[in-house]
Image (cartoon, rainbow, N blue to C red):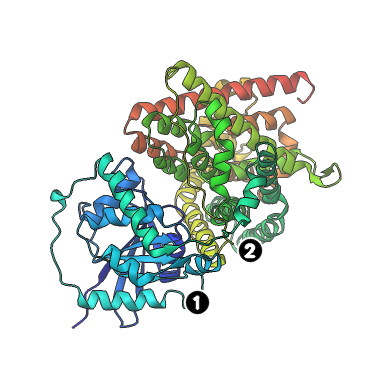
Amino acid sequence: MEAPLLHLALVGTPNSGKTSLFNALTGSRQKVANYPGVTVERKEGSFVTPLGRQVSLVDLPGTYSLRGRSPDEEITRDIVLGRTPGEALPDLVLCVADSTNLRLTIRLLLELKSTGRPLMLVLNMFDIATRRGVTVDVPRLSQALGVPVVTSIAVRKGGTAELLRRTDELIAAQVPHPVQPNLWQPLTVAQLRATQREADRIIAATISLPTRPDTWTARIDAVVLHPVAGLAILALILFVMFQAVFAWAQPLMELLASAFGALGQLVHDTMPAGLVQSFLQNGVISGVGSVIVFLPQIIIIFLFILLLEDFGYMARAAFLMDPIMGGAGLHGRAFIPLLSSFACAIPGIMATRVIDNRRDRLTTILIAPLMTCSARIPVYTLIISAFIPARQVWGFVSLQGLVMFGLYATGIASALGVSFLVKFFMWRDYAPAPFMLELPDYKMPRPRSIAIGVYTRAMMFLQRAGTTIFSMMVLIWFLASFPRPPAGATDPAINYSLAAMIGKALEPLLAPVGFNWQIAVALIPGMAAREVAVAALGTVYAIEGGKEAAEQIGQLLATKWSLATALSLLAWYIFAPQCASTLAVIRRETGSWTWMWVTFGYMFALAYAASFATYNIAMALGAG
């Protein structure tokens, strides 16, 4: 008879190494989704214990408490208690702790004990604690807590062997007992303080700290947290990241572009001319391929963000930015969601759950889409490559990368400006709560965790390319191909299409900002996904100009657009109304259609105003 599937849950405070342990146990056997009805990310994986037991492992959101002050805390609490529909009650809860900093995790574990669920404490990063002179009396700690305690080194091969062995023992000896979630009550503030005092007593009795603590973290922090030098280092890191988007990704982008070009040429040479050839070459290969070639740049953005998180710098960056954020009416914790929005506004908006106050969270949600997400990179790259010379300034800085950095900086400045206006006009009498954040110790990034994180996000982008982008390109190809031109027509075929009719109907609205009807056509599917605008331009101009235009869309735009139009489109995309997926997440996070439409409306107004000013100033300066 086949043994039943076991359900385990990982619980821990942020920066406890929980994700590294999850990756070490499950490897590539994991999937990411959302919990039903909310935008909290759900990570689930599977593994097999030494005794052959099949285990399903869920990585619950990081939390300091089970009080349920934020959606993250609510999800963790409800799954532990079995209150979440469709989620299995955990057979065992693994409470993961950073062995170098146990204070808050021991308090969390004492809270978890009050739920009545089977528990085991996992002292992760035990090698780092030992190296720093931290001594843990594991048997005495286990006795004091009343739960099994094991040590773990998630980043080392074999570092989870003891955890797996004890898991088998606990599951074999466990007596099933039903949980009664409705009887559990969250701790009051007084009870939490008492629980923290109990945690401190246990730590004092079982853990010895070194007489001469490790000072490397303090030495590094003396530099990176300096009010002047720290901000300069942060600006340098961001500058290098945006330079890398152009410089490092270029060889791989050229390789992908050549591959799609060769595939398109193969279809052109082997298939007879007609609608099928046009659909495959211009609609599928040219359309989807023109977006996938930007995958290396998107991977670089994710790589930098994951490295900064793993190294422990992200919390320092939030601390550094707190005075600046506070001046704009933002809570210091808003920095991490806003930085995450550089990759995509959706996880950035979801990350606002770490902000307790609803006003602070709402302000951050409203401005998160102004951060330059990875979906804008294809648009920026296409226009910058076509209109900005590929040369060095100051002898070592790419002019194209400098322009890209300027676009990112403008997005950041506009976000802070909008936040200031929101505070001034809507919540003038409100002051954000003082910023308190636990700074984790510095750690070397874990290659395995970084690789899994980058791979997961790359697959999500490719899935998006294979679904949303592909469906939009089929729609654009259809609109650009039908109806067919009448007999004896002399203009390009696309001039008689549905796309041209739609674009020309919108052209009077967009003419003041320098946009032609082809751009109007591209902006519409861009609402489904911003990067689709590039593919749409490729499809429209490819059908208009033939095979050569599809292969060299950038050069074609340089001959058909003025510099003023190109700059206007860049300005538009700094503020461009966000994609439909982001709008949906805003509605779900705020629980209101009103805030979704407010965000769409103000961003559309900003985009139009910025493009109008840019286009007319550029024309006045002779860029027409």
| Image position of 337 (left or right of 268) | left
Q: CA distance from mark 1 to mark 2?
A: 46 Å
Q: Relative to 577, is 259 on the left or the right?
A: right
Q: Is residue 401 left or right of residue 433?
A: right
Q: Residue at x 55, y 30 (%)?
A: 415
Locate residue 8: give its quadrant. bottom left
The structure residue drawn at horizontal position 61% and vertical position 38%, both measured from the top left corner, is: 488
Left/right placement of residue 270 relative to residue 159 reads: right
Q: Quadrant of residue 352?
A: top left
Camera-side residue of 25 and 233 = 233
What residue is disc 1 on? 157
**Residue at left offset 45%, top offset 45%:** 347
The quadrant of the picture occupied by the C terminus is top right
Q: Nearer the viewer, residue 100 or 210?
A: 210
Measured as percent of width and height from the top left, residue 553 is found at 68, 45
Q: Amino acid at mark 1?
A: Lys
Q: Residue furthest right?
A: 395
- Residue type indicated by callout 2: Leu
Is residue 37 in sight in this rendering? no
Tell me the element at label 1. Answer: loop
Question: Can the viewer see residue 412?
Answer: yes
Q: Residues within 10 Å of mark 2 (few under 14, many from 20)?
A: few
Task: Give the quadrant of the N terminus.
Answer: bottom left
Q: Which of these two is toward me, 566 or 118? A: 118
- Give the residue at mark 2: 266
Which element carries disc 2, helix, strand or loop? helix
